């Protein structure tokens, strides 16, 4: 949380404006119902016009679960649009910072329309400064940021099979972790 606050301070976001839900790093999948309730409460309180979230693409379990929860909750609350962005995944691992981000192939939703968002030099420098604040993640972000990012409108269909496919957790295991409806009506 301290690293996130320091990173967001680079672009002028005050720590008082940051909400940390407090779930354990690498363990969000064990708290899907709780995370869903918290995300639903935040969405209701904030009333966002647009939501941005990680893509479900097998790069990091917490990121995939976050994407699942946000997309599922947003669909149930009929909030949108939701956009997801590509990070690292099994098909597009990090490399020299000149690499462009791309989404992993999704066997459940094949025809996403993507929008590239290249950085100008100031944005690239800001992103480098932000990532440098994550001392605990130095090995993970060594080859980031990409010179551009890519967005696509999220399609909250086949969410459970997609999450199972990309996380390599079985649908049965995920259903047991979800336990009950993930988002309140």
Image (tube, rainbow, N blue to C red):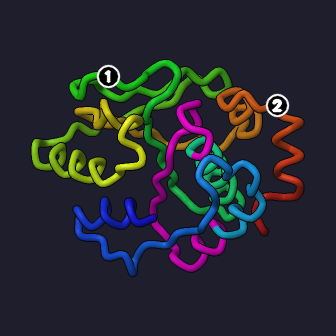
Residue 53 picture location, percent across and down: 50, 50
Note whether 101 is above or below 55 in the view shown. Answer: above
Q: Position of residue 58 (x, y in %)?
A: 58, 30
Residue nearest the viewer, comparing 20 with 83: 20
Q: Is residue 172 left or right of 152 when viewed as pictured?
A: right
- Mark 2 Cα shell of 10 Å, populated few (<14), some (14-19), many (≥20): some
Residue positioned most to the left: 121
Mark 1 highlights which residue?
95
**Residue in the picture at 48% in, 69% down:** 48
Residue under the image location 72 percent in, 48 percent down: 29
Q: Magenta segment, which residues?
A: 39-62
Q: Is residue 144 left or right of residue 110?
A: left
Q: Residue at x 66, y 69 (%)?
A: 38
Asked if residue 124 is positioned above or below residue 143 in the image, the reply reads below
> What percent of the width, then of the height, locates residue 151?
40, 40
Q: Is residue 89 magenta?
A: no
Q: Does 57 lie within the magenta span?
A: yes
Residue 178 lies, with reference to residue 140, above or below; the image says below
Expressed as whole percent of the image width and height from the top left, the position of residue 175 reads 86, 44
SS class, disc 1: loop
Instruction: Give the left or right position of residue 28, taking residue 84 as reference.
Output: right
Quadrant where the image shows the C terminus: bottom right
Q: Secondary structure at mark 2?
A: loop
**Residue hosting label 2:** 170
């Amino acid at each position: 949380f301290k690293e996130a606050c320091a990173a967001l301070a680079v672009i002028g976001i005050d720590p008082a404006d940051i909400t940390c839900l407090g779930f354990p790093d690498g363990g969000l999948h064990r708290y899907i119902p709780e995370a869903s309730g918290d995300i639903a409460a935040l969405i209701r309180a904030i009333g966002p016009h647009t939501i941005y979230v990680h893509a479900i693409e097998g790069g990091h379990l917490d990121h995939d679960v976050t994407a699942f929860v946000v997309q599922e909750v947003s669909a149930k609350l009929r909030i949108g649009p939701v956009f997801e962005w590509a990070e690292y995944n099994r098909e597009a691992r990090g490399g020299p910072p000149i690499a462009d981000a791309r989404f992993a192939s999704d066997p459940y939703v094949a025809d996403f329309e993507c929008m590239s968002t290249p950085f100008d030099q100031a944005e690239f420098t800001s992103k480098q400064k932000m990532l440098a604040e994550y001392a605990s993640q130095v090995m993970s972000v060594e080859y980031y940021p990409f010179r551009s990012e890519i967005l696509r409108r999220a399609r909250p269909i086949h969410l459970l099979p997609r999450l199972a496919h990309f996380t390599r957790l079985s649908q049965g295991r995920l259903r047991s972790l979800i336990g009950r409806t993930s988002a309140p009506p």
